[in-house]
Amino acid sequence: MNITSIASLLCIIAGVWLIFSNVTHLFPFSEASSPPVKKAAAKPAAPKETKSEPVLYPERPSKGEVIGELVIPKIEASLPIYHGTDEDELDQGVGHFAGSVLPGEKDNSVLSGHRDTVFRKLGEVGKGDLLIAKTTAGEFTYKVRKVRIVSADDRTVIVPKPRATLTVTTCYPFSYIGDAPDRYILIADLAEKKLN
């Protein structure tokens, strides 16, 4: 093995370590697998406006605050969205993973809910179906591009995306008794936006 091969291998190992060491503490999908950690978190700064992207949310929401409504036409559901994914938020509705962007913003906005409450019928939603996030910034319609079933430890659902994406997650299988081993994931791309 020459010096270039060794250096390349070390760079790959360092990159993988950095990715996993930085996202493992961010994964919001615990559904009773571990107690939620309560800590005082500062509000993230609002994104800066660019010529092509206006600022949709001048102020970031506080934990536990209602930030909007998720409408799923396929299952005739209209669900409140709370900022945060601790049990306090998930017991009331859909939780918005605070480490992700808000609906309508460029990148990956992640929403989670319990399979035995708000997302009981989420398994009926699939590729081509619409997910509509209504917030103070406007109405954002997403079209489901992909359905995935992943292990509860899979962190790829919270990674950044190059465009406005909505990722909706719940525990799976839907009929499982106890802590479910997997997650049902809907990945949807922004198809239409109506700003307020």
Image (cartoon, rainbow, N blue to C red):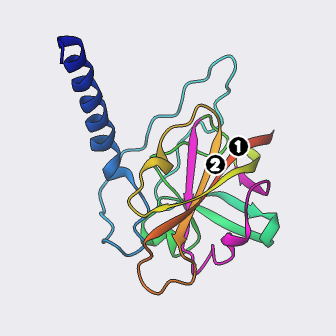
| Residue found at the far bottom of this picture | 177
Kindly indicate whether the residue at mark 2 contacts the one at mark 1 (C-beta within 8 angstroms).
yes
Q: As drawn, is 35 to the left or to the right of 85?
A: left
Would you call the spot at circle 1 few (<14 residues within 10 Å), some (14-19), or many (20 or more)? some
| Residue type of the residue flagged with mark 1 | Asp
- Which residue is at a point 19% across and 20% down the rendered structure image? 6
| Residue type of the residue flagged with mark 2 | Leu
Image quadrant in which you'd find residue 75: bottom right
Q: Which residues are magenta?
A: 107-135
| Label drawn at residue 189 | 1
Would you call the spot at circle 2 few (<14 residues within 10 Å), some (14-19), or many (20 or more)? many
- Quadrant occupied by the N terminus: top left
Is label 1 in a helix, a strand or a loop? strand
- Which residue is at a point 74% across and 56% down the rendered structure image? 127
Q: Which residue is mark 2?
A: 166
Q: As drawn, is 94 to the left or to the right of 84?
A: right
Choose between 123 and 158: the one closer to the eye: 123
- Quadrant occupied by the C terminus: top right
Is label 2 in a helix, a strand or a loop? strand
